[in-house]
Image (tube, rainbow, N blue to C red):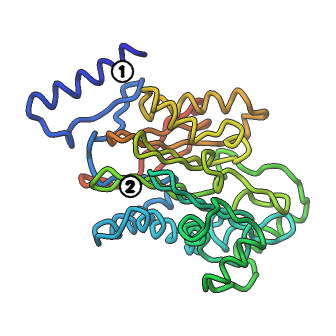
Amino acid sequence: MIAMQGRRKFLKKTIIGAGIGLPVSFGTDSFGLTTGPVGSKPLVLSTWDHGMAANERAWEVLHQGKSIVDAVEEGVMVTERDMSNLSVGLQGLPDREGITTLDASIMKGDGACGAVAFVRQVKHPISLARLVMEKTPHVMLVGEGARQFAISEGFPIEEEVLSERAGKAYHEWKKTSEYKPIINIENHDTIGMICMDANGNMAGSCTTSGLAFKMHGRVGDSPIIGAGLYVDDQVGAATATGLGESIIRISGSFLIVELMRQGRTPQEACEEAVRRLIAKSKGIEDIQAGFLALNKDGEYGAYAVHPGFNFARHIPEAKGMIDSSSYFKKK
């Protein structure tokens, strides 16, 4: 592994010495898979196909001259208000009591961060998380306290009613009321976004309506700094998606950033995090979890427990969806 990392550094220096610009220098993971043009900035990555519209908005915000925090906030706000989405925003699937509760976090590369959890009736929890970061001495507010803070900051309080699609799904679930985590390779939640601006500054955001039909009061990884999201300008950024309990147990996003600090590529770090998650999870055949990471050189990587995880990428040269590799392969 050390020899491989040394070879990468040698190749990068060789390319630079040959007069070839960094935007055309591509990193590779341990399987030779292209992970991205090194040094290509700005760079916006987000989980799942709903990340395409989110990335588009983040890209617009960056090119309007706004901050990288504006970009990661406004980007995922697109998903929070997307009525076709059942895993993010107030239109998302409710808990087992029929109540939709939301979690979100936001973080800058200098360590500033904010989060809200188990919050009700707030359309844009990511914006509330940002105000926790910027206007309070705290990192996280939860439940009624988060809602009261939203009211004090002038957020409109939405009527507490399920969306049509979420309502139908909830009433169908109530026929059996079978309680188990419903996150597998076909069912996911969350949008996590990590971003680097033209100056190399990084930030990230994560927002979700959480696990469908969860116990009332359950909180997953998305609002937990170090689990669902972690950003460090000196190293890189990571975000997670899938069954939050499995991600919390390994402090997944923090783990990935620390592995990158030790010299792992984003791809290698994501793969190691998945291996550790599998080692500490029961019933892994029904659990999907995935990680997305970016380092300060502009390399990125992604890895999941099962096939099916994908992410949206927007760079100056291109935009589109990329399928992640996974620990278990397609049957």
On the image, the x and y values in percent for residue 243 come to 70, 47
Residue lying farthest to the front in this orientation: 137
As drawn, 205 above or below 1: below
Residue at 65 percent of width and 78 percent of height: 150
Camera-side residue of 175 and 216: 216
- Identify the residue under disc 1: 5
Mark 2 residue type: Val
CA neighbours of label 1 inside 10 A, class few (<14), some (14 to 19), many (20+): some
Residue 320 percent location from the top left of the image: 37, 54
Mark 2, residue position: 44
Quadrant holding the C terminus: top right
Q: Amino acid at mark 1?
A: Gln
**Viewer-proximal residue, 273 or 258?**
258
Question: Please, what secondary structure does the residue beneath circle 2 have?
Answer: strand
Secondary structure state at the residue bearing disc 1: helix
Q: Residue at x 44, y 51 (%)?
A: 109
Q: Quadrant of the N terminus?
A: top left
* Residue displayed at 29% across by 18% down: 7
Q: Is residue 215 visible?
A: yes
Mark 1 / mark 2, whichever is N-terminal? 1
